Amino acid sequence: MSLLIKNGLIVSSTGRTVGDVYVEGEKIKAIGRDLDFKADEVVDASGKYVLPGVIDPHTHLEMPFMGTTAKDDYKTGTIAAACGGVTTVVDFDLQKKGESIHDCIERKKEWASGKVAVDFSLHPGITDPRPEIIEEVKDAVLEYGTPSFKIFMVYDFRVDDATMIKLLKETKKYGGLVQVHAENFYVIQYMNEILEKEGKLEPYYHAVSRPVLAEEEAIARAVKMVELTDSRIYIVHLSSGRGLYRVKEARDQGLDVFAETCPQYLLLDEERYKEPDFGGAKYVMSPPIRSKENLDELWVGLKMGDLQVVSTDHCPFDFKGGKDMFGKDDYKKIPNGAPGIETLLMLLHTEGVVKGRISLERMVDVLSTSTARMFGLKDKGEIAPGKDADIVVFDPEQKFTITQSKLHMNVDYTPYEGMEMRGMPSVVFSRGKKVAEWRNDHVEFVGEPGWGKFVKRAPFTGF
Ligand code: DUC
Ligand code: ZN
Ligand code: ZN
């Protein structure tokens, strides 16, 4: 199969140019003006953008959590991804007690098999750090193709500082990267006790129980461990201005401290927790969404490069029978997480690019190019000869009102219901295969579950 995308505005992290993209099989073969190739399919992209497929490096597909399971599996989650222009997903894969990293990875590959609609990789989540697991880091980086490791400083499966130090040392040796969920467990425990005594158990108090200070302290501590070990770290779902300040401070010192944020922390504020009829539960995620000032600070961090990546932390639970069933009387029992994989690109374009907070190039950088570089996705993240033909032909003028019934995520709500979008995917290609296209009033999936492949990632080589 060959494909010629004509006259689009081809956007990279460093610039833009009008031209054609020629694809043969699964790879981009040529870029230029008036390319003279015969192709099986020709797409007229006049007036449209030609973007590299988005990479979402933070999802929790089918993850068992807080007594239930995240509702999107590899099929529904990656169909939704494709419809949103996401052509690669790097999913978290939390180790079970007693399990090796190898078995942990093989287990989730098995779940994905025959179902996954776009390419995927895995970040092992280290929750049982036995000595042989620390030793296995070398194989995970150099052989399994999974060079990034998630650790939690909070939850029952958190690791202590000693484990963090060991992992930082070991990953540094082989080109691994430690990703940290940074919140101080004891601060949250203390706040929970106070709120419990005061009978403050509505969803709003989820945010009160996890103050910015808990994130700031955990980031500052993790940074110190990086300084100690001369290693590197990546803070996931950074949510606050104070947290960002700690990241900037570390980077100004020359430390390899990186961070991502997510659309929910850029666009939603803590007033949402006060929505009537228990509606605030829809936004119960950790860390929580914050007060308005934080949102502005994160946009600046994104624009200026202190935040390198935007991901989703896609972890969906139904509102009815999920959020409301488990946590009706106590915010601590509400399953933490929200859907977002399908709305990532449209939100960043409308709220970031159209509103002038970031440039189009910066959007491509934080959604694709930097993400590929950070996580060793050598064949992804750019429209360039030799790269995988993961391409989004994007109509910057296409309007769309976000509503759950026109999305594909397997969940009964979206946190962005009613938001007006400007700019939507017209056609999405995964390794040259059409997987989604705009039809009438929304994007429809036209791909094939099982098409997606596991991608072995390369070790970290610097950023
Ligand atoms: N936070 C969430 O809100 N959900 C999944 C895990 C996490 O850290
Ligand atoms: Zn997390
Ligand atoms: Zn997460």
Image (cartoon, helix red, strand yellow):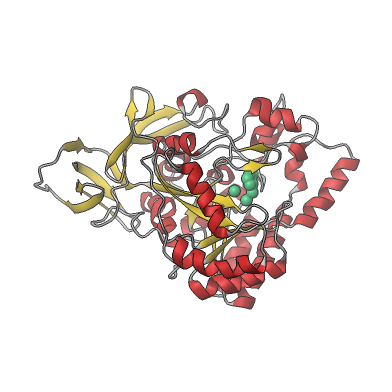
Which quadrant would the C terminus be assigned to in this image? bottom left
In front of the other: 402 or 371: 371
Q: x and y percent of residue 141 in the render?
A: 48, 66
Instruction: Please name whichever residue, 422 or 280, is drawn nearer the observer in this view of the structure.
Output: 280
Q: Residue shown at 12%/48% (left/top)?
A: 35
Q: Quadrant of residue 386 in the image?
A: bottom left
Q: How many marks?
A: 0
The x and y percentages for residue 314 are 55, 42
Residue 367: tell me if it is visible: yes
Using the image, determine if residue 416 lies above or below residue 91: above
Residue at left offset 59%, top offset 46%:
265
Q: Nearer the viewer, residue 358 or 46?
A: 46
* Quadrant into which the N terminus falls: top left
> Where is residue 256 drawn, in percent x and y?
53, 70
Q: Is 181 located above or below residue 166 in the figure?
A: above
Kindly tell me whether residue 300 is visible in this rendering.
no
Q: Position of residue 452 (x, y in %)?
A: 38, 43
Q: Residue at x 52, y 39 (%)?
A: 340
| Image quadrant where residue 332 sits | top right
> Seen in the image, is 108 located left or right of residue 443?
right
Residue, far right: 197
The residue sitting at 33% across, 58% down in the picture is 14
Q: Nearer the viewer, residue 77 or 351?
A: 77
Seen in the image, is 94 located left or right of residue 436?
A: right
